[in-house]
Structures are given as C-alpha cells and as structure tokens.
Amino acid sequence: MNRLTPEEERVIVHKGTERPFSGEFLYHREKGVYVCRRCGAELFRSEDKFSSGCGWPAFDDAVSGAVRELPDPDGLRVEIVCAACGAHLGHVFRGEGLTEKDTRHCVNSVSLDFRPAPPERTERAIFAGGCFWGVEYYLEQVPGVVSVTSGYIGGTVENPGYEDVCRRDTGHAEAVEVVYDPARVDYEALARRFFEIHDPTQLGRQGPDVGDQYRSAVFYLDSDQKAVAEKLTGKLRENGYDVVTEIVPAGTFYPAESYHQDYYRKHGTAPYCHRPVARFGGEASGPAQ
C-alpha cells in the first residue's frame, strides 16, 4: 500500500470529496490507465474518460471487476470503491444520457494515479558512472524515460553476478540500460544528464566507490550515439574538465540481481556519491533530487 497524504486519507479512507474543478485529472487527456492511489490496481482506461461538466473526472466504463458498487449511507447515491483494497473513489450515476453507455463514474482525482500508455517506439542507451544505484535514480527522473535497469557490461564473462563483478576480474562495469521514448527525449539530453550526475574526471572510481567496475563509460549502440558522446566530452574539455570517460561500443548488457533494481526508491533514501552538477554552463538539466 502507498503512503497517503492527509488530503488523500480524508477522501480515500474517510470517504470525503475533493473540491470540484480542483483535481489533477479533471482535464487530463493523456493515453493510459488510471490506477488506485492506495494500492495501484487498474481502475479506468483513458478511452472511457469524458467531459461531463460536473467538476470531477468522469468515466463511462471501468476495468472489468476493478470497481465495486455499494449503497451510499445517504440512501440516494451509489458509492464506488476499489475492488482490490476498498479505497473510496466517488460515486456512479446512470440515466443521465451523457454517453452511449449512459453511465458516469464520478471520481476524485486524489483517489487516482496515472500510468501512461507505452510509447509506440522506444530506443536504448547504456551508461556507466559509478554505482548503478545513483545513475539509475537520476536518469529515471528524466521525462520521456520509460525504464532504467541496473546491470553489467563491458566484461569477458557471460551472465556475471554482483560478486563476480566485485572481484574485479571479469572486466565488467556497473551500468544502466535506459529505455526511452524518442518522441519525448533525445539521446543527447540523456547523455548530457549522465555527465551532469557523475564526475567524468575520476578514473576507476566514483566518490568513495573504488574499482574499475565503477569507471565512467558511454557504451554506444550506433554511430550517432558515439558522435553525441564525443561532442559532449569535447565540450566538457573546453570547460576545463579532464574527462576520462570511455566511449566504447556496447556489448551484451546483463541485468543485475532484483535487489539492485530501484534501490533508492525501495529504501526511501538518496544517492551518496551522485549529485547533479551544471558542467555545461547554466543550471543542471534535470531535477536536483
């Protein structure tokens, strides 16, 4: 279960109602699925959302079996709750003639989260810049990034594990594979962010983490990525940085063990050896944390 804010608890747990025309998703039009704020269960799809003029998000259908209807204590309305966890969502009305389905699920925005539909096309990027926990943490915050996976690349052993890499005899680097939507973010923006969140002047280490597995490297997947990496390292050198980042062709990327994925999010902490620095002039290009 997700931790709720006081306002979310007032609505979701104590069956309150948010102010009309104030909700985050009232005018939301992105394609995807709306999920329960408390438990994450899928509830409504974007194609079933419509403008009702009532002041709250409206849907004329729900995901099959996801929403339960209960008689409201006032005896007049029908309450809708998440079938998975019982979270209060709002009320359902019928007979208004607003859509062909003649149904209006009137839902509080604070009862919902949103998961965008997967992009039609994705591309990949692979970066190594010290402990993969921190690189993953910052790159997954970039708008347009679909997923970031921590793993190993650049070595001579197939299917290495964390202990293998830590022995420093496989040649692998701790790295991240970024899957992104090129319609929303391009490779250069990701590479620029990568150079801002780690120190590309440290050889065989990153902060307190020492060893070749913590080296700085761009593992390019095509000539365009190589050209971008070389352009950005050139700019950094012009700005006075003694860059040691390797720019090498990507080999096989091996995902790390599950306990390494989303490490900081799972533990509620923040990176200890990565932080955004504006190395290209101006301000750093993404969120500070």
Image: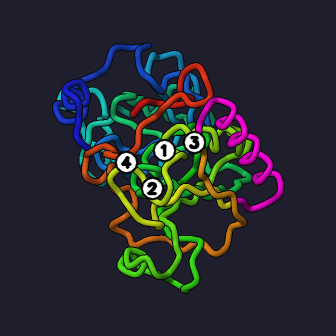
The residue at the point 38 percent across, 52 percent down is: 41
Query: Where is 172 relative to 197, above or below?
Result: below
The amino acid sitting under disc 3 is Phe
Residue 223 relative to residue 278: left or right: right
* Residue 79 place in picture, x, y as percent: 29, 35
Q: Which residue is mark 3?
A: 195
Q: Name the residue beneath numbered marker 2.
A: 130
Per the image, label 3 sits on a secondary structure element best described as helix
CA distance separating discs 4 and 3 = 46 Å
Are the residues flagged by discs 2 and 1 in contact, CB closer than 8 Å?
Answer: yes
Q: Secondary structure at mark 4?
A: strand
Q: Amino acid at mark 2?
A: Gly
Residue drawn 46% across the image and 81% down it: 169
Which segment is the magenta one?
220-241
What is the CA distance from the residue labelled 2 to the residue labelled 1?
7 Å
What separation in Å lies between label 4 and label 2 (alpha carbons)?
45 Å
Q: Nearer the viewer, residue 104 or 47?
A: 47
Q: Nearer the viewer, mark 4 or mark 2?
A: 2
Marks 3 and 1 close (CB-CB < 8 Å): yes
Sooner in the amino-acid sequence: mark 4 or mark 3: 4
Task: State if disc 3 and disc 4 touch (CB < 8 Å).
Answer: no
Q: Position of residue 159 (x, y in %)?
A: 51, 83
Q: Is residue 67 left or right of residue 71?
A: right
Q: Amino acid at mark 4?
A: Val
Quadrant for residue 250, please give it: bottom right
- Is residue 48 visible in the rendered structure shown here? no
Of tags 4 and 3, the one toward the viewer is: 3
Q: Which mark is residue 67?
A: 4
Q: Residues within 10 Å of mark 4 (few under 14, many from 20)?
A: many
Residue tagged 1: 198
